[in-house]
Amino acid sequence: MTKTSPVNPLMLSAIGCLLAGPGTAFADFLADSQGNLNVRNFYFNNDYRNQPGPQGQSKIREWGNGFMLDLKSGYTDGTLGFGLDALGTLGVRLDGGAGNHRGSSMFPDDSDGKAVHEFSRLGVTAKAKLSNTELKVGTLLPKLPILVANDGRLLPQLFEGAMLTSKPLDNLTLVGGRINEATGRASTNRSGLAVAGGRRESNNFSFAGADYQLSKPLLLQYYHAKLENYYDQDFLGLIHTFPIVEGQTFKTDLRYFRTRAEGKNDSAQGRASGYTLSGFGDTPGRIDNDTWAAIFTYNVGGHSLTGGYQSVSSGSNFTQLNQASTGEGAAGSSTYLPTDRFVSSFLRAGEDTVFGMYSYNFVASGFPGLTASVGYYRGTHIIQSGAQDAQEWERDIIVDYVIQSGHLKGLGLGLKNAMLRSDVPSDGAQDQTRLVMSYTLPLF
């Protein structure tokens, strides 16, 4: 059932100021407005090989068009400015009927279990700005270490809540907020918040953090997040870019997450009632995890070589928001891990992952707009219940091209192909291909 949220006071205040204010108040509101229509044509094929779905099919094969109308106003004139943003999305199924749909990966499930022919959402965001501080209330698409909106299918995942961003100093950015609902990438329904495997919803995800540019090459980060009755999470990050010589750099990216049980997840009774986490660990269902990752990237000319290592402790799986078990078709989530790939995320309890990627930007060869990469990820020591530790590996190939001139300038074409082989029964063997064509049409 679709959930609705009451209109919040800030949104009413912003609308009231816009309607009641003098004509001059609209000068910047209108002059600084932007409108874009983003069009995405998406073909998705996931072959589960020897793992038939509920209707017997072992493959997802779906094709659709996504339309995203993104309207952003400027701010009204004055010390305290107000504005409104709106995001309207529409997904239309072109192919992928009976036998090709398995769960709500690309499209919501219809009443008969098949994919719907179309689905749409509308999000509105009220905003206010005072000097270098901005408050947004309504629909959000956060991209933070502790919360990343997923955009891996036809339409993006949406969150509802409030977020405050401030720059008290040129080299310091402060962020804080609260999220209470989410809309899955293949859903029209809002749901409460949970973790993978969690059957009970929470409506309180609060967070705060800071990005501090200590020097031009060095960025330091700290964030804290709390999902009520599930977990507390701290994040520490360091990004350093070292210029070796002209045209060569070496980048170091270090990430550490400390995640502990909070509220009902911290008790056996609470976990039994549904506040639980999927996967295995020291105490089944209880969140208790330390995850760290080190990523090193060497760039020279158009070449980029990345290597790294990630370690997930044995207490539990690594976790961030995931609404897959809430019953609202909200499957599909992202995490701020370097191993968050197309098929697997390499986040299971005890898992150690070694990875490498080679990328090339063909502008160095006189062919701007074309990029390609190949990556390989291997995870070991995955904890399983009553079985030997498991392993998995994934190979990814990515080719993207953006037309640089002519009538089709800005048209993007992308191919993504992934192969996963895992000892974990729920993943097994999967081959995945995505073909994406995208274009942004400026409206004003």
Image (cartoon, helix red, strand yellow):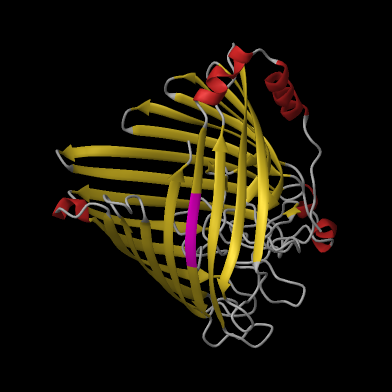
Where 425 falls versus 80 (above or below)? Answer: below
In the image, what residue occupies the spot 48% across and 58% down?
A: 40
Where 172 falls versus 207 (above or below)? Answer: above
Residue 340 appears in view:
no
In this view, the residue in front, 228 or 360, is 360
Q: Where residue 296 sits in the image (x, y, percent)? A: 32, 50
In this view, the residue in front, 127 or 235, is 127
Q: Is 280 contained in the magenta span?
A: no
Query: The magenta stretch spans which residues?
Result: 38-42
In the image, what residue occupies the spot 48% across and 74% down?
A: 391
Q: Where residue 367 sits in the image (x, y, percent)? A: 19, 55
Residue 199 appears in view:
yes
Where 141 falls versus 285 (above or below)? Answer: above
Q: Where residue 331 sits in the image (x, y, percent)? A: 64, 63
Going by the image, does 116 lie left or right of 44? right
Quadrant of the rendering where the N terminus is positioned: bottom right
Q: Where residue 373 sits in the image (x, y, percent)? A: 30, 62
Going by the image, does 248 lie left or right of 408? left
Q: Is 40 contained in the magenta span?
A: yes
Going by the image, does 18 lie left or right of 438? right
